[in-house]
Amino acid sequence: MSMELEFEDLLDEAMDLPDSPAKIALLEQAIRVADAAGDIEQGYEARSMLVNTASFNGFPMKALVAFSWQLGQYDKHPELFEYDLHNLLWSYKWILDDLPSFPDIQLGQIHSLLEDFKLRIKKAGHSERTYDYYRFRMALLTGELEKAGEYMDKWRPVDRDSLSNCQACEQDALVEYFFMLGDDERARVEAKKIMSGRMSCAEVPHVTYPKLLMPLYRTGRQDEAAKLERESFRLIKGNRDFIKAAGLQMIYLTHADPFRGLEVYESFAPLTHNHESPMFRMVFDGAAAVLFKRLAREQVKFNVRLPAYITESGAANDVSRLSEIYTELAFDAAGKFDKRNGNRFYTGEVERLLAQVGE
Amino acid sequence: MNSHTQEEFRFQVDLSGMINILSNHLYSSPKVFLRELLQNAVDAITAMRERDSSYQGQVRAEVIGTGNGATLAMEDNGIGLTEEDVHEFLAMIGQSSKRKDGQLLGETSFIGRFGIGLLSCFMVSDEIVLLTRSAKGGPSLEWRGKPDGTYSIRKLENELSYGTKVYLRCKPGCELYFDPANLEEWFGDYGALLPYPVVLESEGVSRTINIPHPDWMNNLSLVRGRREEVLKFGEQLLGEQVHDFIPLSSSSGRTSGIAYILPYSVNLSAKRSHRVYLKYMLVSESAENILPDWAFFVKCILWTDELQPTASREHFYENEKLETVRTELGESLRRELMNLADQDPERLKGIIQLHALSMKALAVEDETFFRMIHRWLPFESSYGRRDLGELLDENEELYFTLTLDEYRQIMHVAAAQSLPVINGGYVYDAGLLEGLQRLYPGRKIERLLPEEVSFSFIDLTADERRAYYELIREGDIALQPFRCRVQLQRFKPAALPSLFTLSKESSDLRNLIAAEEVSTTELSSILNSLGASHQEQVYSTLYLNLDNEVIARIFGSNHLEILRAAIEMLYVNALMMGHYPLNRKEMQVLNEGILRFIDLGLSMNNGGDTK
C-alpha cells in the first residue's frame, strides 16, 4: 500500500472496514489530507463518518472533536451543508449523550449546549420533545434523578418526530431510569417490550440486558438472570462500546458466579485501555473493584490476565491488591464526577457497590 | 369481563392486497413462485414417504406454448389433497398460526404452508388450476382460484393418480417466468439437491435438473477421498472455480456442508453469501448469518434440517439455534485449519497468505488459533512485508507501532538503524502484536513510540553540547509556542535533516485545537476545558540530525536569525510532510518564513548582510 494515499482512496478503504480503531485511524488520516488541502467539503464528509463510527465504538472524544468542527463549518457555510442539517442534528444528539461522560465538562457548558441544541431543532421545525428527552438524559447521567423524572414526564406524552430516538432506545432509557432509581420491579416491567424481541436497534437490547441482571437477581429470578447473562455476553463481546455494559454484567456475576465474572473481566479489560469515556471506565473499574473483592474470599491461586495499564508486579496473583487498585480508580473518577455534578451520586454508588460484598 | 357475552369475529382479509404485500414486500423476486411450487411438491412427497418409506417421489414440470400464451404445468406424485384440505389451506391464508381447536400450526403443517405458497403463483398468473387426488381417499378434484379471492371446486369424473398438478397461465408481462431456459436455471437453483428426480419438459425435450445426489452429503467422512468430485459439485452449484475446501458439520450432524475456500481475497465488509439448503431445498443463496463473521474467506454450500426459515423462506431466524449452529460450524472450520497446521502446513500457508485479513480477524479472537498460525501471518515491517515467523527468527527484539502515522514517522529512521519495527496500523495488527507478547513472554516485543527511536541516536559529545548549547536553546524557544521541543543529535540516514515525532496524544490535541478554532462558542468552550487537562503533558519533538550537511551548516554558521527561521521552517515542513494541517500560527510562520528567506537570499546576492 502506498504511504501517500489520496482522500478518496482513504475514504474507500475506511468504508471497506468494519467499525474498528483501524477504520477510525483511516478516517482521521483522510481528514488530515482534506484539511491540508483546505477542502472543507471533504473534511466535512470524512468527519461525518468519523462521528458516526467513533460515537458507537468507544471514542466519544474523537466524535466530539470532529462534530465541533462540523458544526462550526455549518454555521460559517450554511449554503454548503444545508443539505446535511438533519444528519447533523442527529449527530448532535449522540454528542449530547456523551457530554456528561467527561468530568472536565462543566454543568453550565452542558446546559448552554442543550440550549443551543434547542434553538437549532426548533429552527428546523421540530418540537421540543427531543430537547426534553436530552434534558432527561443529562439529569439522569449527572445523578439528578428527581429532575430526570420531571423531564421524563415532559417528553413522554408528546408525539414522536423524525428527530426522536428509536423506540427501542427510548424504552431502554426508561429502563435505565428505573434501574438507577433502584426500582427493580418497574425496570423489569419496562424492559418487557425489549425482552420480547419486539424492540431492537444497534445498541438495544445490548445495553439493556446488563441493566436487568441485578433487578432479576434481586427479585428472585435467578434462572432468568443466568440465561440473560449468556445472551447479553454474546451481544456485547469484543466491542469497546459496551464496557459499561460489561461492568454491569460483572457486578451481577460478582454475586451469581464470580469466576464467570473474572472471565468477563479478562475479555473486556484490554478494551478499557485508552477508552475515551471516563464515565464508562468508572463503571468498569467499580465493577472490577467489587468483583476482585469478592474473589479475594476464594482459596484459589489466581493468575489474572491483566490489561497493559496495570503494571504493578505481582498484581496478577493478588486479587485483594487488584480490588484496591480498582477501588482507587473508581473513587477517583466518582469524585471528579460528583464535584462537577454538585452531588454525591457516583461516590455513593461505588460505596454501595462495595458494601454489598463483605470482606 | 364476562367471557360468555363475548363474540368472536374474524378479520376480513383482502386477497389481492395480500398478494401485493407478498410480491412487493415479502419475497425478493416473483421467481420464488417456482420455489413455492417445488416446495409444495416436496412436502407432498415427504408426506407420502412418511406412510411408505420406500416410496419413489418424482416431480415433473412442463411448459406448454410460448410467450404470453405459455402455460406451466407442475406435477408431483405426492400425497394429494382432499376437499377438506383444499378448503382448509385457503382458510389458513392470512390467519394467525393458531387453529380453532387451539392446536399450534407449526413448521410441519403441510396444508397451511401449501396455501401460502400457492398464493405466490398469483404474482405471475391470473388463474391457478389445480388437479389433485388424495392418497387418504376421496374423489379427484379440480380447484380453480382467482386473485380476487374466489375459487371453485369440481369433482372430476375420471380418476387421477395420487398427487397434485398445478397449471399456471402466463400473465401479461410475466413471459420471462415461463421461459424454458430461465425455468431450467431457477429449478436448478432451488431443487438441484433433491434426492429424487425433478424433470423439466419443454418443446418436446425432457431434462433432469437435479444433480446426482452424492453419497457423501450424508457422510462427510467420505469427502477426503473424493476431492475432484467435491470440487466439481461446488463449481456446479456456486458457478465459480474453486480449488480447495473444508468439510463442516454441527455437533448434532443436522447441519453440514462444504466450505469452499475462495481463490481470491475479499474485502472485510464484503457480503458473505453462502448457499443453504433446508431439507434439500435451497433457502438462500446469500445467507450471511450462518457462519461467524470472520469466515469470509469461504463460500459454503450447507444443508440443514434443524434451522427455521423466515416467513419469506429466504433467510433463517436469528435465534438461539442459529447461534449454536453458527458457533459449531465456525468451530468446525477452525479445527480443520488447525489440523492443516499439523498435516499440511504449506497448504495452510497458501490459504493464510491469500486471506491474511480474515485469518487475523480470527486470530485476534482466538489465542489458540493465533498461536497455531502466527508464524505465517504477513506484516509490514521496516524490513518490508514479511511473515511473522521470519521476523521472530531473525530478531531477538521486535517493536511495533500502534498507528500508521507513528509508523510513517519513524519508518525511515528505523530502517536506517536496522531496528525491526512492525506497522501495527492496519486492522487487527496492533491487537495481534500485543497478543504476541503473551505467546513469547521471555522476549522483548514492545510498542515503539516515535520518540523512542531516538534511543538509538548518537548523543552529542560533551564538547559539542557546550558548543551548541546556546543555539539549541534558541531553537527550542522558537518552537515553544508550538509545544514542540528541539533535540540536536546524530542519526542515520545522514540525508535526513530532521525527524519530527508526534505521539498519538499530541496528535489528538492538534485535532482538538483545530476544531476549537472553527467551532461554535459553546463547543469551543467545551473543547477548551477538555484540552486544558492534557496540555501540560503533550509535547512533540523535532530531532535535528547533525550528521546532515545542511543542519551542520546551520549550526556552524552561528547566525541566530537564520537558525531561528530555519528551525521554524523545518518544523512547518515536517508537519506538511506528515499531512498535518497547519493551524493559524503555523500558517503565519510559513508565510513570514518564506518572505524572510527571499529577503535573506536577495540581500546575500547584493553582497550585503542582514541585521
Image (spheres, rainbow, N blue to C red):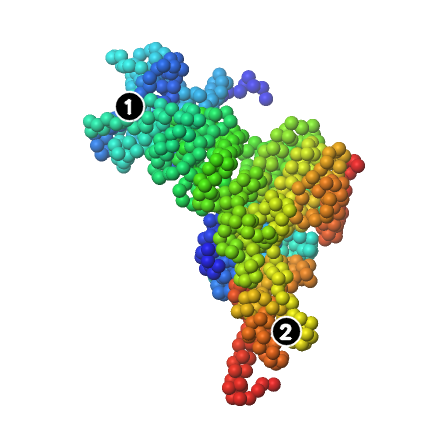
* Quadrant that contains the C terminus of chain B: bottom right
Residue B475, which numbered label?
A: 2
Question: Would you identify the image quadrant in which residue B298 lies?
Answer: top left
Q: Residue at x 30, y 25 (%)?
A: B198
Of callouts 1 and 2, the N-terminal one: 1
Q: Amino acid at mark 1?
A: Arg
Whole-percent x, y for residue B220 in the image: 43, 27
The residue at which mark 1 appears reads as B60
Query: How many numbered discs?
Result: 2
Q: Residue at x 74, y 50 (%)?
A: A332
Q: Is residue B100 above or below residue B378?
A: above
Task: Name the residue nearer the viewer: B146 or A296.
Answer: A296
Q: Residue at x 38, y 32 (%)?
A: B227
Q: Is residue A24 above or below residue A317?
A: below
Whole-percent x, y for residue A33 in the image: 50, 61
* Quadrant that contains the N terminus of chain B: top right
Task: Name the residue nearer the viewer: B148 or A258.
Answer: A258
Considering every residue shown, the one lying at the far bottom of the view is: B607
Q: Residues within 10 Å of mark 2 (few under 14, many from 20)?
A: many
C-beta proximity under 8 Å, tags 1 and 2: no
Q: Is residue B194 above or below residue A78?
A: above
B216 to the left or right of A119: left
Considering every residue shown, the one lying at the far top of the view is: B137
Whole-percent x, y for residue A77 in the image: 50, 63
Q: Which element carries disc 1, helix, strand or loop?
A: strand
B368 to the left or right of B124: right
Q: Residues within 10 Å of mark 1 (few under 14, many from 20)?
A: many
Q: CA distance from mark 1 to mark 2?
A: 89 Å
Residue B392, which numbered label?
A: none
